[in-house]
Amino acid sequence: MNSFLDAETKEKLRRLAEEEQRSLSSQVSHLIRLYLRDYETRNGPLGEKETFTSR
């Protein structure tokens, strides 16, 4: 996570993770799952897209 988060954002996430008794990595995973759930609620399921390997 060090490579893509600025220091302020990382510190905010660290504090939130601490409040929710999660590791930073667990907190990021949790937030991604929440975002995806919200997105799919508003836009419908994100099905698997066809890829070169699935053709």
Image (cartoon, rainbow, N blue to C red):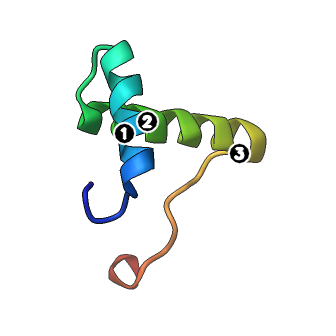
Looking at the rendered structure, the kind of residue marked 2 is Lys
Quick check: 36 above or below 2? above
- SS of the residue at dot 2? helix
Real-space Cα distance between discs 2 and 1? 4 Å
Q: Nearer the viewer, mark 3 or mark 2?
A: 2
Left of 1 or right of it: where is 44? right
Q: Which residue is mark 3?
A: 44
- Mark 1 is on which residue type? Glu
Residue plotted at (43% across, 47% down): 8
- What x and y, as percent, mark residue 20? 37, 15
Q: Which residue is mark 2?
A: 12
Earlier along the polypeptide chain: callout 1 or callout 3?
Answer: 1
As drawn, 43 above or below 16: below
Q: Are marks 3 and 2 in contact (CB under 8 Å)?
A: no
Nearer to us in this view, 39 or 14: 14
Type of residue at label 3?
Gly
Q: Tell me if mark 1 has few (under 14), some (14-19) or many (20+) residues whose alpha carbon lies within 10 angstroms of its own.
A: few
Marks 3 and 2, Cα distance to the nearest angstrom?
Answer: 30 Å
Which residue is disc 1 drawn over? 11
